[in-house]
Image (cartoon, grey):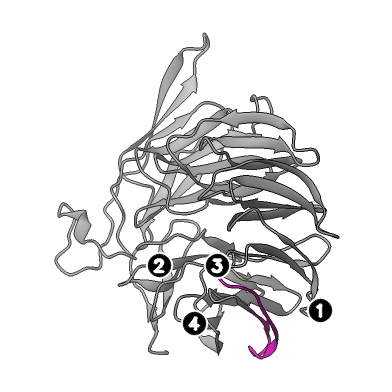
Amino acid sequence: MRPNQQYLPGEPTSAARGAAVATVAGPEGEPARRTVLGLLGLAVLTVAGCAPGTDDRRADALTGDSRADSDSDSDNGAGGGSAEPGTALWSFGAGRPSRGPATRYGDVVLCGSGDTLHALDAADGLLGWERRTGPASAAPLHHGDGLYVALAGSDASGMVVLDPADGSPRWRHSTRLGVFAEPVADGDTVYLCGLDRTVHALDAATGQVRWTFETHGQVFNSPVLHEGQLHVATGNGVMHTLDTADGGELRRFTGGGQPLAPVRAESGLLLLADRVDSRLYALDPATGEETWSVAAAGGPTGLATAGDTVLLGAGRRLTAFGTEDGEERWRADAAPEHCPVTVVGTTACHRSAEAEVVALDLETGEHRWSHEADGAVLHLATDGDILYLGADGKVLTALAV
């Protein structure tokens, strides 16, 4: 076993203690209360001196359950087929800020608040289980039969791997500094990049280190993995392209600095938004050469792509460009400092200047609907049908699109 690898004992965690309460529409439109009682059991806590009935704040960050309240308000089924676009299907975690984008696998939606990861029923938002992981800001990765959670804390940094069924820990890989980038995986290898200026290629089942690569700067955003190549953008503007077989560097591209997470367009082009020189670059993935670039309206704060369109949030503006030539197609008002953006089908969703979620027609930019969030909009994510909104006043809200 390598020094930075720790196998964690402990019993699997059962459903969260207590009652999860959902509100559903009654027959006359009046809210009807439904209480779902989970199985009450005693968790085995592995921290010395922490026994059932003692203060859970002393529970181990990776093996102890959280007793956080489970407050899920459910108004519709998660399919959203009959719901009016922009309406909330259900919500979870009132009064608590979202810590990172949500992700869905099967019938489960994962979200987080503080140092805790929550697993919710995708149909109604009811809590299935939760696990104290330590601070994190990246979306969890579901790959194979594991959940890979990047850890951004000063005391707990690196990655912990959990069982998707109940959140029980399997193994942990420690790094010198925090990890803010979502892990990526292919086959039996998972790749982790962080503030320690190192790319870690790990065996997905055991955490054994296969290779490492020292980057030119700290990594804040998730890399792009495609056809045996890993594209890693560093905070000082260098994007390394690595061979996933051995970690050898194939090429590098240098921009101004502080890029957003690169994304891969449907055409295969790599799109990189640079916050220092305020430009959007389209790169040939085979050569690393610039295909085109355009000036942004300001420092980029959001980037997404769908079909032949790339969306860039920058300088109080959301702009749609063609991925083939960089030609501008339309523009709309957007939040100035932080503009998360994602695409659900043919709908572009972003944070507006009024801190609402705004949905626009992807092709024309025409307004479709708006939703007032519970506080500032922090994160937007999608499973292809539903929009998942993380705000500073509510952990997660599922919206019909």
Label 4 residue SS: loop
Quarter the C terminus occupies: top right
Tell me which residue sits at (49%, 61%) in the image: 138
Q: Residues within 10 Å of mark 2 (few under 14, many from 20)?
A: many
Label 2 sits on what residue type?
Answer: Ala
Label 1 residue SS: loop
Label 3 sits on what residue type?
Answer: Asn
Tell me which residue sits at (29%, 60%) in the image: 64
Q: Residues within 10 Å of mark 1 (few under 14, many from 20)?
A: few
Percent coordinates x, y for residue 311 in the rendering:
70, 51
Tell me which residue sits at (36%, 74%) in the image: 8
Q: Are marks 2 and 1 in contact (CB under 8 Å)?
A: no
Indicate which disc, 2 or 3, sits on the residue closer to the N terminus. Answer: 2
Quarter the N terminus occupies: bottom left
Camera-side residue of 358 and 33: 358
> How far apart are the alpha carbons under marks 2 and 1?
32 Å
Percent coordinates x, y for residue 371 in the rendering:
56, 30
Above or below, 83 relative to 385: above
Camera-side residue of 337 and 344: 337
Q: Could one spot residue 78 in this view of the protein?
A: no
Query: For mark 3, what is the residue?
Result: 221
Query: For mark 2, what is the residue?
Result: 152
Query: For mark 1, what is the residue?
Result: 286
Indicate which disc, 4 or 1, sits on the residue closer to the N terminus. Answer: 4
For residue 197, the mark is: 4
Mark in front: 2 vs 3: 3
Label 1 sits on what residue type?
Answer: Ala
Label 2 residue SS: strand
> How far apart are the alpha carbons under marks 1 and 3?
21 Å
Residue stretch rendered in magenta on the structure: 239-257
